[in-house]
Amino acid sequence: MPGKNVHQSWDEQRQQWKVAREGASQASGYRDTEAEARTWSQELAPRSGSEWIKQGRA
């Protein structure tokens, strides 16, 4: 059974990149740069049998 997808999105209120599993009530964590968030979320996704999805800010 596949895991929950990992979403990376910009949190306007915190001014940081948010990494969260799909359907989670809380973020898995926040990162200051897009590169840090991408690296972390791309490492997190395969470990849980899911995919990485980027949302927001081009």
Image: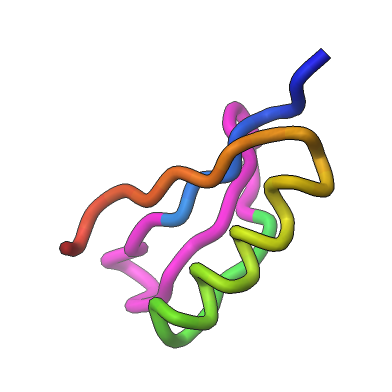
> Which residue lies at the image location 59% right of the left edge and 44% below the top edge?
6
> From the viewer's perspective, is residue 12 above or below residue 49?
below
Q: Is residue 56 left or right of residue 24?
A: left
Q: Which residues are magenta?
A: 9-27
Q: Percent x, y for residue 24? A: 65, 35
> Which residue lies at the image location 60% right of the left edge and 27% below the top edge?
23
The image quarter containing residue 43 is bottom right
Residue 1 lies within the magenta run: no
**Could you say which is closer to the camera, residue 11 or residue 1?**
1
> From the viewer's perspective, is residue 58 above or below residue 16?
above
Q: How many marks?
A: 0
The image quarter containing residue 51 is top right
Scheme by which the image is coloured: rainbow
Residue 19 lies within the magenta run: yes
Q: Is residue 51 left or right of residue 49?
A: left
> Which residue lies at the image location 60% right of the left edge and 34% below the top edge?
5
Q: Percent x, y for residue 15? A: 33, 78
Q: Is residue 30 left or right of residue 14?
A: right
Q: Quadrant of the N terminus?
A: top right
Q: Is residue 17 left or right of residue 47?
A: left
**Outermost residue toward the left in this view:** 58
> From the viewer's perspective, is residue 24 above or below residue 40?
above
**Outermost residue toward the top in this view:** 1
Q: Quadrant of the C terminus?
A: bottom left
Q: Percent x, y for residue 18? A: 49, 62
> Which residue lies at the image location 45% right of the left edge and 55% below the top edge?
8
**Outermost residue toward the bottom in this view:** 32
Q: Percent x, y for residue 27? A: 61, 53
**Could you say which is closer to the camera, residue 33 or residue 50?**
50
